[in-house]
Image (spheres, helix red, strand yellow):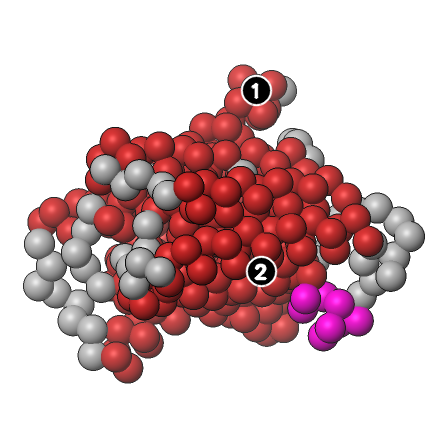
Amino acid sequence: MNIFERNVKKVVILAVVAAAFSPIFVRLTSAPAMAIGFYRLAFALPVFAVMTLVRHREEALSMTKKQLGGCAVAGIFLAGHFFSWFTGIEHTSVASGSVLAMTDPFMILLISVFIFKEKTNKKAVAGVIVAFIGSVIISGSDYSISADTLFGDIMCLFAALFIGLYFIAGNKFRKGINAAVYVFFVFLFCWITFTIGMLVTGTPFTGYSANDMFWIFVMAMVCQIGAHAVFNWCLGYTSALYVATCENLETFISTGVAMVLFAEIPSIWQIVGGLTIVAGVMYYTRHEGDSNGI
């Protein structure tokens, strides 16, 4: 067991800190959301490609059409998450956007129960309801500020929906695929989706400032590799519950940094709504695997 495996819980915390800087980097670039997504994946993909071809070449070459199709579906959902998230954080505060994007358990529960007819339990439902109430509190207070801010909140909720679909797709399609290979192909199809999006929307591929490209590159290294890739590695050595619980810290870190850099001081209602969402998500995470389904 190497030093990283022995200290995996500390590694999770470092990955959470890296992920928390995603909305900060978005704010530091003026590029459109579609271009941010395209270049974030373009900068990160070569790293995953080399890792996959060097260590898992045979597994990558033996992927079936069905497995590739599953990765494509997950990649499209991930692209939807990134686009919604980048768009949302450009229109709302870091505090509101970060906590609203955490409501993906609510989205997963709705999809699992109403579409896949899966059973759940009352405690998990209670946690999701609490998180939903927190979302209403934040959205209502932000609407009193401006309709544009409410639009940002709605896009962050869509980000939560898409990441929920991404997790569900991973649960359905990842079976039998090496984790590193799965992540590479998902990111590849995510990048292809953004490429098509750039062409369809007429978003230019060039013309962005050195500042824009610098912060997108930093986002790719810190958030895509330092957070997304590390989270996937950590799941092999610690529980998903621990990772999910630690991820709740992202909101507080993002909000704290935004207060220092952008002077974004959360309103009392944003604080109340944010804490309500965090409490609901943590309660849901704690009880989602309980028996006594409904």
Report the disc number at residue 56.
none
Residues packed near mark 2 inside 10 Å, few (<14), some (14 to 19) or many (20 plus):
many
**Residue furthest toward the right?**
292
As rendered, which of 222 and 184 lies closer to the eye? 222
- Residue drawn at 44 percent across, 35 percent down: 252
Foreground mark, 2 or 1, reads 2
* Residue 120 position (above or below residue 196): above
The residue wearing badge 1 is 7
Q: Earlier in the sequence, mark 2 or mark 1?
A: 1
The residue wearing badge 2 is 164
Q: Amino acid at mark 1?
A: Asn
As rendered, which of 269 and 10 lies closer to the eye? 269
Q: What's the magenta region?
A: 110-117
- Residue drawn at 35 percent across, 60 percent down: 144
Residues packed near mark 1 inside 10 Å, few (<14), some (14 to 19) or many (20 plus):
few
- Majority SS type along the magenta span: helix
On the image, which quarter does residue 161 sit in? Answer: bottom right
The image shows a total of numbered marks equal to 2
Query: Is residue 233 left or right of 156 when viewed as pictured?
Result: right
- Residue drawn at 73 percent across, 73 percent down: 114
